[in-house]
């Protein structure tokens, strides 16, 4: 079985759904698995505000690399602890569109 990091598919998925979703949305929310500066920059390039919490909460802000990742750590501390709701939305999307959606 081959494992792949979902974070690599984030910019590709944004590009594929831009004509359907991005015109209607201003925010994009992801879980800690999508935490990378590149993903934040990709979302901003489409005019979206990305809300992706830091993958490693215990690392101090001054050690965190990237402008948007530091911004998430400063502005989103302990507010994002509602993972069950996010996972429910992911489940509903996969149920509607099938498992081929990554």
Image: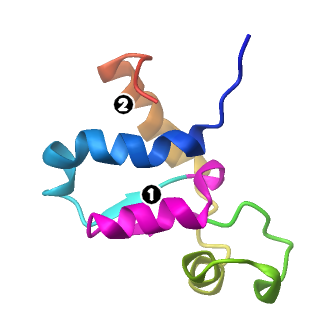
Give x and y (percent) for residue 75. Answer: 57, 85
Residue lying at the far top in this picture: please name it: 1
Give x and y (percent) for residue 44. Answer: 36, 70
The secondary element bearing badge 2 is classed as helix
Give x and y (percent) for residue 81. Answer: 64, 61
Q: Is tag 1's residue or tag 2's residue first in the polypeptide sequence?
A: 1
Q: Is residue 79 magenta?
A: no
Residue at point 25%, 41% (across, down):
17
Residue at point 39%, 42% (across, down):
12
Q: Is residue 92 above or below residue 41?
A: above
Nearest to the observer: residue 52 or residue 39 = 39
Label disc, if present, on residue 29 of the rendered structure: 1
Name the residue that disc number 2 marks.
93
Q: Is residue 80 above or below residue 95?
A: below
Q: Is residue 36 magenta?
A: yes
Give x and y (percent) for residue 62. Answer: 79, 89
Residue at point 83%, 83% (across, down):
60
Q: Which residues are magenta?
A: 31-52
Estimate how packed mark 1 is, as few (under 14), some (14 to 19) or many (20 or more) residues with alpha carbons within 10 Å: few
Asked if the residues shown at circle 1 and circle 2 are in contact, with their CB atoms under 8 angstroms apart, the answer is no
Task: Name the quarter where the N terminus is drawn.
Answer: top right
Estimate how packed mark 2 is, as few (under 14), some (14 to 19) or many (20 or more) residues with alpha carbons within 10 Å: few
Q: Which quadrant of the view contains residue 97?
A: top left
Task: State the count of labels.
Answer: 2
Decide if residue 45 is on the left or right side of residue 51: left
Nearest to the observer: residue 95 or residue 59 = 59
Rendered image coloring scheme: rainbow
Decide if residue 34 is on the left or right side of residue 63: left
Label disc, if present, on residue 51 of the rendered structure: none
The secondary element bearing badge 1 is classed as strand
């Amino acid at each position: 079985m081959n494992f792949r990091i979902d974070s690599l598919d984030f910019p590709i998925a944004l590009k594929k759904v831009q004509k359907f979703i991005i015109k209607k949305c201003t925010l994009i929310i992801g879980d800690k698995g999508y935490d990378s500066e590149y993903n934040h920059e990709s979302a901003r390039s489409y005019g979206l505000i990305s809300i992706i919490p830091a993958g490693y909460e215990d690392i101090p802000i001054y050690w965190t690399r990237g402008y948007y990742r530091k911004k998430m750590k400063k502005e989103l501390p302990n507010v994002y602890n509602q993972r069950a709701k996010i996972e429910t939305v992911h489940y509903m999307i996969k149920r509607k569109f099938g498992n081929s959606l990554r």
